[in-house]
Image (tube, rainbow, N blue to C red):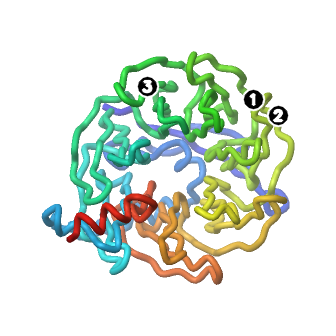
Amino acid sequence: MRRALVIGAVLLALGGGWFVLAESSGEAPVTGAGDRTAEDVAAMPRQGTQAMASAATPPAVQPPSANQATSTSGLAFVINSAQASIDLIDVATRQTVRRIPVLREPHHMALTPDHRFLVIGDTGANELLFLDPVNGELARRVPVSDPYQFGYSPDGKWLVVNGLLRNQVDIYDAISMRLASRIPISSMPSHENFSPDSTVVYVTLQSSNSVAAISVPTGKVLWKAVVGPVPAGVLWHRGKLLVGVMGADYVAVVDPASGRVERRIVTAKGAHVLFVPHDGRVIYVTNRVDGSIVVLDPDTLGEIRRFRIPGGPDDMDFAPDGKIWVTRRWEHSVAVVDPLTGAYTTLPTGRSPHGIWLNTHDTLAARIASSAR
């Protein structure tokens, strides 16, 4: 049975900010498909915990045929971490057309370099699911240890898997899925990003408040450095690393050669993950505890605007009409946000929606149209 996380955080407010003062055993163990990761427990305010406990389970969606699940406008794939399922939502009608059950506790996903498969990690089940990115049909399952967060290197040669509960980082040959390196690391490897030349992967370590730089070809840890309490998302941006420091209210600007924090960009409580739209004109930062999204200028990293998105905003993706689709972990829904005004509508999902991806990007749009003819 999967080890449950028992982490409590004592939060101290100072001038509108907050940080993790101490960790203690203060919450009852949670088991089953609804297991929360350390980032959930450390960041979730009390009202969010109550909302999760009392929220009604959305009605089951009857799975249609593969053809019915394919939409000419495209599909949004939403991972329901606490309901062991994946929702497929029609991007145009915003209706859930299919719910795909998985075994235990999925969190994140990645598109294979050749765009043939959308890979979803079922952490508690210790497997990767390879789905058709057009219609969501399952192609194969691959046993992998604790695939919480993972990603393909820019050159397409490597797949790096973070085992959050097993305190390990696994590096696979992306084609053969042969395990090349297993790196024991402390503690709780969470998010990751690569150097543009694919030689280094940068991994945030939530329980040690650090980032580690790991050589992808050799599996050697190059450096490990403290960046702030409970680091989460990490983004390579113009020769620097930008790290969302979830136990505080800032994004750390980090030197990728040494791990030294050069600057702190204040956003809001629970700074979590960073996203860049396809045109690269801005950077979005989700702040889970504050319930907001902050928009940064990519040149100065100064704040341009912010949107109020309550309910634990987490991952996001971008639709062809310019709207932003954002998962709301504590409200069991997706917010579809107008990036100009911050106005949004919500779509119901399963419990604790986490990863989200729209299949409306680049060559997939042509495949969707072709398959629907």
The residue indicated by pointer 2 is 260
> At numbered mark 1, what does the secondary structure look like: helix, strand or loop?
strand
Q: Is residue 169 above or below residue 48?
A: above
Left or right of residue 123: residue 252: right
Q: Nearer the viewer, residue 256 or 239?
A: 239
Residue 225 bears which disc, if any? 1
- Of the residues under marks 3 and 2, which one precedes in the sequence? 3
Left or right of residue 354: residue 1: left
Q: Which kind of residue does numbered mark 1 sit on?
A: Ala
> At numbered mark 2, what does the secondary structure look like: helix, strand or loop?
loop
Q: Which kind of residue does numbered mark 2 sit on?
A: Arg
Across and down, in percent, residue 99 comes to: 24, 61
Instruction: Give the number of the mark in front: 1 or 3.
Output: 3
Q: Nearer the viewer, residue 251 or 92?
A: 92
How many marks the image carries: the answer is 3
Q: Residue at the location (76% across, 42% down)? A: 240
Across and down, in percent, residue 118 comes to: 35, 48
